[in-house]
Image (cartoon, rainbow, N blue to C red):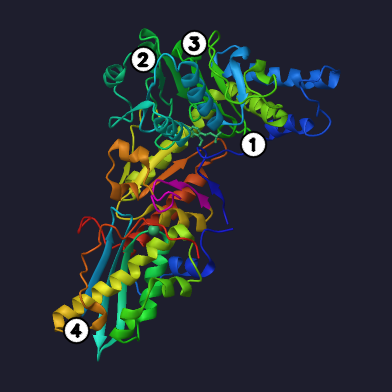
Amino acid sequence: MRNVYLDYSATTPVKEEVLQEMIPYFTEKFGNPSSLYDKGLESKEAVDNARAQIGALINADAKEIFFTAGGTEADNWAVFGTVDKLKEKGNHIITTKVEHHAMLHSCQFLEKQGYEVTYLGIGPDGRINLEELEAAITDKTILISVMMVNNEIGTVQPIKEIGKIAKAHKILFHTDAVQALGNIPIDVKDLGVDMMSMSSHKIYGPKGEGALYIRKGLRISNYLHGGAQENSRRAGTENMTGIVGFGKAAELARVHFDEHVKHCSELRDYLVDRILTEIPDTMVNGTMEARHPGNANITFKYIEGESILLMLNYVGISVSTGSACSSKSLEPSHVLSALGVPVEMIHGTVRFTVGDFTTKEDIDYVVENLKNIVEKLRMLSPVNAQKGW
Amino acid sequence: MALYNDTVMEHFMNPQNVGELENPDGTGTYGSPVCGDMMQIQIKVEDEKIVDAKFKTFGCGSAIASSSMATSMIIGKTIEEALELTNKEIIKELGGLPAVKVHCSVLADKAIKNAIYDYAMKNGKVYAALEGYDPNEDEDEHDHDVPEEE
Ligand SMILES: Cc1ncc(COP(=O)(O)O)c(C=O)c1O
Ligand SMILES: [Zn+2]
């Protein structure tokens, strides 16, 4: 059976070149980068090399990159490190309703501690309203955190404009760029962000590795306490293979950026076009303008997403869904809710994300199978276009 | 490693008793697309026996599989017997469901009850198990309380 992986926003395979860079750091190059002999220095050099590779991808200095155990830790550090540092100044955070749970649940935790959080909504294009943002700012606001690219609908926020507003009000600005990295151009200096979260496993690097960009001159409180690693900002012996792999993945993402974006967006557009023209009662969620190049988020009306997912899985196709029934919390997607998609349609929503290893034949295989599956599930469904919901 | 066992997958991929009856003696629905799961079931009754049943379900894998299993289980049963069918028995016949999915199969026993209720109302029948039963009662709260794993 053919295997077609269309869930690159969930995670990506480690590229062969990346793996090859990593392997020596499991075995012969096992030195601790904090050690002062050659074997240690060899590892330290590798960490700094990876730091530079990541810096180059986002136009940051190597010293502004701090390695973490993934995007989740980077988000947590940015929020908790900022509120701790600025606790004298204020207790108000502004973020959005469509953030990843790494950010949302951190903010909800803070609300329980007495912090005030404003969750901005989004318009039909998936973007926040800048006037609403500005209106939400108070003299107690200490952090604005808005994700760069949404993980479900792939829509892009006006980061540069948000950065200007934050700067004008002298408020720190963090962005979760986990889905943006390698997929849209990022220049932290041009964008005016103070902190930015990144994750390795979304760009063909290993899992459990990420980084927080912290602008030079900015000091937030530490989140992990211990040794003097990462310039005494993030403790813990370095995950050498993770860091080296992330660095290499970032370098590949930079060198092959145009190719990657062209490949993904062409296949994604082909997938969307075929679904919308060949399968009735379907719609795309979120604007197609300036969107994550691999993301297609599609509602199949009158049927439910987990059923679609299961039947696709049965023929070797991997996707994800916004349906409540497929989530452990039994809550429908908070992103699609914020976008205004009616709940009954959220249940029938599937996210496809194409990546570097996707081929046109893969897409053809997916569309042919989808046609059968959607028809089969609609035969099973008590609701349909004639009867309505 | 799969989300569902083979029996559930078999009923999901090849569901039994799908569709609608031409002249049903009773029709029941339960749930709604807003909740994420909705089932419609129709029954044909002869001499107090359910001789045929058909379903249509909007929902996840376990909702569809339990609809298929439940309709298979009531065909051939008397009305009184069918009224005794519980969610637990359906799940047992399916060889178990993941704990978070148990709520989806509640649809089936409720929809069956509603279909029998419809039959009873149309035919002036009275069943002890339906005494005081209001099919619209807990329409809103059928869903999301997740029972403990057994
Ligand atoms: C937008 C966004 N933020 C944060 C994360 C968490 O990153 P990680 O899996 O590296 O902890 C993800 C990954 O799913 C994500 O998509
Ligand atoms: Zn369900």
Q: Looking at the image, is mark 3 or mark 4 nearer the viewer?
A: 4
Q: Nearer the viewer, mark 1 or mark 2?
A: 2
Magenta-colored span:
A317-330
Query: In the rendered view, does A270 fall on the left or right side of A66?
Result: left
Residues at marks 3 and 1 touching, judged by CB atoms closer than 8 Å: no
Does residue B150 lie above or below A181 as drawn?
Answer: below
Residue kind at label 2, given as amino acid type: Glu
Q: Which mark is residue A161?
A: 2
Magenta span dominant secondary structure: loop
Read off the residue under disc 3.
Answer: A189
Q: Is residue B28 magenta?
A: no
Residue at 75 percent of width and 17 percent of height? A45
Q: Earlier in the sequence, mark 3 or mark 2?
A: 2
Which one is in front, A11 or B125? B125
Q: In the drawing, does residue A118 fall left or right of residue A145?
A: left
Disc 3/disc 2 C-alpha distance (Å):
13 Å
Q: Residue under mark 1: which chain is it in?
A: A
Q: Are marks 4 and 2 in contact (CB under 8 Å)?
A: no
Give the quadrant of ligand 2: bottom left
**Element marked by disc 4:** loop
Q: Mark 3 vs mark 2: same chain?
A: yes
Q: Secondary structure at mark 3?
A: helix
Query: Which residue is label 4 attached to?
Result: B126
Q: Chain of mark 3?
A: A
Q: Chain of mark 4?
A: B
